[in-house]
Amino acid sequence: MNILLHMLLSGDDDQLLVGNFMGDFVKGLLQDRFPHRIRQGVQLHRQIDLFAERNPHFRQSRQRLDPAYGLYRGVLVDLFYDYFLVNDWGNWCEEPFAAYLARTLVVVERHRYDLPTEMQRLVPIIFDELLPTYGTIEGIDAALGRLARRIRRPNPLASGVAELRQHHDLLHVDFRAFMPEISHFVAVTVLIYTGHSVS
């Protein structure tokens, strides 16, 4: 659920960004369900998720969290990494954070009807309520509470921000080691997909 990181890794390619943005909401085979470039964005989203699952820094972050969270530790790390991304924003993006959100919202809205129906309804919430608060622990707490309510089965996500508070500095170290590696991976992957680098 690290929507912000997926978006940023898409570079300046609008359709790639849209596909990457909606990747968590697209299941199964892609075939011809979306325009080609958006489909590549969904594929990129899946490749990023697979890379993260296998990356030693991301895995280390998961292992730092209480085992009681089980498989949800990966979800927590996703959101925690978005939190660190906002707080380190100037290291990874020259465009100010608020300007970036405003610009990418325009891109997403332009492709609104390419998005899955459920995600169309969530766009205002994501851009108006969630992403602008991701740089605060309170914002991550609210996002986890919202996510916990969306999952139909019982889950421990609503209390997950305690893990961010407890392991904050070590998780930040993991994130800073992870970012150059995922950025390089995406640059190579996009070049293979398209023949063009992420800019």
Image (cartoon, rainbow, N blue to C red):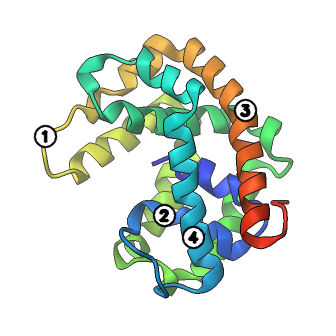
* Distance between the alpha carbons at the discs numbered 1 and 2: 24 Å
What residue sits right under mark 4 in the picture?
A: 19
Q: Position of residue 41 (x, y in %)?
A: 61, 68
- Inspect the image, locate mark 3, and give the three-letter code of the amino acid beneath it: Asp
Check contact, mark 3 vs mark 2: CB within 8 A.
no
* Distance between the alpha carbons at the discs numbered 1 and 4: 30 Å
Toward the viewer: 52 or 110?
A: 52
Q: What secondary structure is marked by label 3?
A: loop
Marked residue nearer the N-terminal end (3 or 2): 2
For image coordinates 34% across by 27% down, the residue present is 160
Numbered circle sitting on residue 16: none
Check contact, mark 3 vs mark 4: CB within 8 A.
no
Q: Badge 3: how crowded within 10 Å, few (<14), some, or many (20+)?
A: some
Marked residue nearer the N-terminal end (3 or 4): 4
* Distance between the alpha carbons at the discs numbered 4 and 2: 6 Å
Q: Badge 4: how crowded within 10 Å, few (<14), some, or many (20+)?
A: many
For image coordinates 59% across by 25% down, the residue present is 57
What residue sits right under mark 3 in the picture?
A: 88
- Inspect the image, locate mark 4, and give the three-letter code of the amino acid beneath it: Gly
* Distance between the alpha carbons at the discs numbered 1 and 3: 33 Å
The quarter of the picture where residue 106 lies is bottom right
Disc 3 or disc 2, which is closer to the eye? 2
Q: What secondary structure is marked by label 1?
A: loop
What residue sits right under mark 2 in the picture?
A: 23
- Inspect the image, locate mark 1, and give the three-letter code of the amino acid beneath it: Pro
What residue sits right under mark 1 in the picture?
A: 154
- Inspect the image, locate mark 2, and give the three-letter code of the amino acid beneath it: Gly
